[in-house]
């Protein structure tokens, strides 16, 4: 048993090392985009922290979802967060499966560049939206009478920049339209729907997204409009951004690492090199030298073959009687 585990661990380690070697060139080229996407997650949290200072509690707005779904209550409020954490870490682990499994359909660096682009575009719209109009928060700590509904003025800039993580993120108020949890959920689900391979998991992912939506409303973390707007806004953003990004290569056919630029190592454009390779291929089919078109013309010239011309020349040059 110990020998078996050691052998399997060695295989996994070799796979991790091989995939790391494959992904490193992509990381060296794409790291500025990845870093920008990660930094923007902090900017998004900072914006949500800032709107909390502007939040003013008030009576709950009339909401169809609140009428249809029973309230979970503070003791069961964790169900919504548990569902989101499950979706988040399931997707995160799936994006790194090329480091472990033989079946690979994408590069981890490229798929996270794509995911971060979707998230940033959606979060920019979200920041603009919740700063435009502040609604009274429906969550328990945002209602009238709660000492956390409105933050006192900050004592210094550092207090704002630190955003009181993670407590300040989980207990924010005012950043309502549209739901940040649904941004992450829908981006992850749509990404797996396109690049995942298991139909059952794709169906399960969409079911989980619907369940997440209902739990957010039932937990009174958002109004129904926050979730509804997220469903069409995020899907439209992903659709638009996806058309602007270059399509990722499919690794399921065992294709090698894609070129990192429009030029190969020898400095030639890819199109020029493709034409040169195609020309060499035609030469291999028709002979080692010369243009294949010229060869066909020589073969068919005057309806005679070169062998016939050569024999005629030899007969003319040979003396009679010998």
Image (tube, helix red, strand yellow):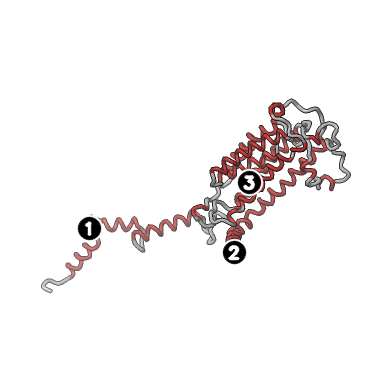
Note whether 129 is above or below 259 in the view shown.
Answer: above
What percent of the width, then of the height, locates residue 258?
54, 55
Which residue corresponds to mark 2?
A: 1
Which residue corresponds to mark 3?
A: 115
* Quarter of image, res 180: top right
- Cα separation, mark 3 vs mark 1, equals 65 Å
Where disc 1 sits, the SS reads loop
Note whether 312 is above or below 118 in the view shown.
Answer: below
| Residue at the limit of the structure toward the left, as seen here | 321
Note whether 161 is above or below 316 in the view shown.
Answer: above
Which circle, 2 or 3, is nearer the viewer? 2
Q: Nearer the viewer, residue 30 or 160?
A: 160
Which circle, 1 or 2, is nearer the viewer? 2
Which circle, 3 or 1, is nearer the viewer? 3
Which residue corresponds to mark 1?
A: 304
What is the tally of numbered marks visible in this picture? 3
What percent of the width, then of the height, locates residue 189?
61, 42
| Residue at 63% across, 46% down | 115
- Cα separation, mark 2 vs mark 3, equals 40 Å
* Quarter of image, res 236: top right
Of mark 1 and mark 2, the one earlier in the sequence is 2
Crowding near the residue tagged with mark 3, few <14, some 14–19, many ≥20 C-alpha atoms within 10 Å:
some
Q: Nearer the viewer, residue 39 or 169?
A: 169
Where disc 2 sits, the SS reads loop
């Amino acid at each position: 048993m110990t020998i078996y585990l050691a052998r399997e661990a060695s295989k996994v380690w070799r796979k991790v090392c091989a995939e790391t070697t494959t992904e490193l060139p992509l990381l060296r080229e794409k790291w500025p985009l990845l870093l920008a996407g990660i930094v923007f997650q902090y900017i998004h949290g900072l914006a949500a922290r800032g709107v909390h200072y502007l939040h003013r509690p008030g009576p709950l707005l009339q909401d169809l979802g609140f009428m249809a779904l029973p309230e979970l209550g503070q003791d069961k409020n964790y169900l919504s967060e548990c569902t989101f954490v499950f979706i988040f870490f399931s997707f995160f682990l799936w994006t790194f499966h090329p480091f472990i499994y033989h079946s690979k359909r994408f590069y981890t660096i490229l798929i996270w560049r794509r995911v971060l682009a979707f998230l940033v575009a959606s979060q920019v719209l979200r920041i603009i939206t919740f700063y435009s109009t502040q609604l009274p928060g429906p969550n328990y700590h945002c209602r009238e009478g709660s000492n956390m509904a409105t933050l006192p003025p900050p004592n210094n800039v550092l207090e704002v920049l630190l955003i009181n993580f993670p407590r300040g993120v989980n207990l924010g108020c005012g950043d309502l339209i549209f739901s940040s949890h649904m941004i992450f959920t829908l981006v992850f689900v749509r990404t797996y729907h396109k690049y995942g391979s298991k139909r059952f998991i794709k169906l399960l992912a969409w079911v989980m997204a619907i369940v997440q939506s209902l739990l957010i409303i039932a937990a009174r973390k958002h109004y129904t409009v926050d979730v509804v707007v997220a469903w069409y806004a995020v899907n439209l953003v992903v659709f638009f951004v996806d058309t602007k990004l270059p399509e990722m290569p499919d690794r399921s056919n065992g294709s090698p690492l894609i070129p990192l630029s429009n030029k190969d190592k020898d400095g030639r454009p890819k199109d020029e090199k493709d034409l040169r390779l195609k020309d060499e291929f035609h030469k291999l089919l028709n002979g080692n030298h010369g243009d294949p078109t010229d060869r066909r013309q020589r073969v068919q010239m005057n309806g005679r073959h070169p062998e016939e011309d050569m024999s005629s020349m030899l007969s003319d040059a040979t003396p009679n009687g010998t």
